[in-house]
Image (tube, helix red, strand yellow):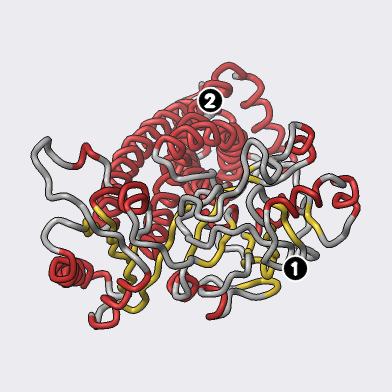
Amino acid sequence: MSNETSLIMKRRFMGRILESGLLIIAVALGVGAAASGLSLMFHTKEYSQNLLNSAEYKEIVVTTRANVEDMTYPVVEKTPNTTTLTTADLKAGEIIDEVLYSYVVSSSHIRLVTEESTNMGFPREGGANPPQENANPENSNGSSSNEMQPGPPEGGDNMGQISEMLETFEDIKENPDYLVPEVEEIEGVEVTAQFFDAWGINAQDGSLFTSSDYTGSSNIIVLGSEMAKTLNTGNYNSVIGKKIVAWDKVYKVVGVLEETGSKYDNYYVTPKKEVSNSFFMRRFGDTQLRFYVDNVNQLDTTATQLSDWFTTQYGEGQVEISNPREEASKVVSRNNGISFLILFLSLAGLFIASVNVSNILMSRSLRMKKHVGILKALGASKKNILMIFVKEALLITSIGSVLGTFLALPLSITMEESLGLGDVSWVYIIIGVFMSSILTLIFSVLPARQSVDIEAAEAMRSAG
């Protein structure tokens, strides 16, 4: 009897191939739209949770007004800015109970010496770009450190010695103590000690900085997990202790950060040195003090306390206090609203498609009364009859769901990229397809109940 029901189902499906094809398309559209909506909602929830749990949005940021974009303020006379924030100002966090960590994170970049750049010429001491003993405090790697004298491989040479060393660049390429990357510039940050504690970042290989590294003259660097692979052609296990030649100094790699899933995977990190209280730093410096507050409900209170402290120290309007979490919360609220709206519309589309599929399958089952009557007269049970319609519904739903999966992928990519959520997760798409398919299958099987309850004699009379 099982073979007989399968043959009947096959004849039903192939005998109305156009109708069956339209049913599959309806299922694919409904499942694809609903799966992309569900995937968007799941991804939005995960993204929002990770965003608000990030240390970046548990910080109060203090910077000078000179570092804030001019459009932030109206065109009125401003108080002259004479303030330079230094690492000494981190003591403000020590007197505020809510502040757990205080640190500095300053953006930086390093121009690396590559084979291509040396072919174009390297600045020699006394040449077109000679180093100056009292050079401007902003060094060539874009940092705000006053440790400007380029160091040797171990930290105390000058530009002329690096220049001489690079005259034999081929020897450096073959020297296992040096990394010779193909990229000409890398991005990173200069930090003070408590940065690693606040972000929960540890060294996967090697070590982080010691307290003496923040005050000494050594040029050391820690690489993010992805940057280490990039600089060492995909393998970071052997970079510890190697040297990287930049245009102003030579850095020694002391560690590789564990993977964090954040931007720091593609960054380098160097110790933040003290900055000078000079006109140059007041005008162009980018030092930002960051105060980490574990209890996010206390962020506004902490911001007020920090504002009072810096006003007492430097005067009214000399620093800008900002709470990045406020903007992050707005982004989260916007993304949640958009994702719920899209989910509602996609589920409405799935419901409409499922109802239409159910109606068409019901009309097809009513046209099978004669077959049902014959099968029952031959001794077929209700279970055998039910399996005819279940197999048909399962076949249509399965094919439609597979097509819907490939439809959901581009929809998910478009929607999630527009909200800035990052890469699409196949896991969420598969979960969405599974949930949508179950709902569609339930609607597809419902018409079978009406056909199963038909009596054999009644079915034969109505067919005649």
Q: Is residue 332 above or below residue 311?
A: above
Looking at this view, name the residue that lies furthest to the left.
76
Numbered-mark total = 2
- What type is the residue that disc 2 sits on? Ile
Residue 347 position in % (x across, y down): 37, 39
Taking depth in this image into account, of 63 and 276 the one nearest to the observer is 276
Residue 336 position in % (x across, y down): 31, 48
On the image, numbered disc 1 is attached to which residue? 240
Taking depth in this image into account, of 396 and 128 the one nearest to the observer is 128
Residue 322 position in % (x across, y down): 24, 57
Residue found 69% across the figure and 40% down from its top: 123
Residue found 31% across the figure and 53% down from its top: 282
Of badges 2 and 1, nearer the viewer stands 1
On the image, numbered disc 2 is attached to which residue? 25
Circle 1 sits in a helix, a strand or a loop, which is it?
loop
Q: Quadrant of residue 98?
A: bottom left
Left or right of 391? Residue 120 is right
Asked whether residue 388 is in view, the answer is: no
Q: Quadrant of residue 53?
A: bottom left
Taking depth in this image into account, of 348 and 49 the one nearest to the observer is 49
Asked whether residue 406 is in view, the answer is: yes
Circle 2 sits in a helix, a strand or a loop, which is it?
helix
Looking at this view, name the residue that lies furthest to the front.
126
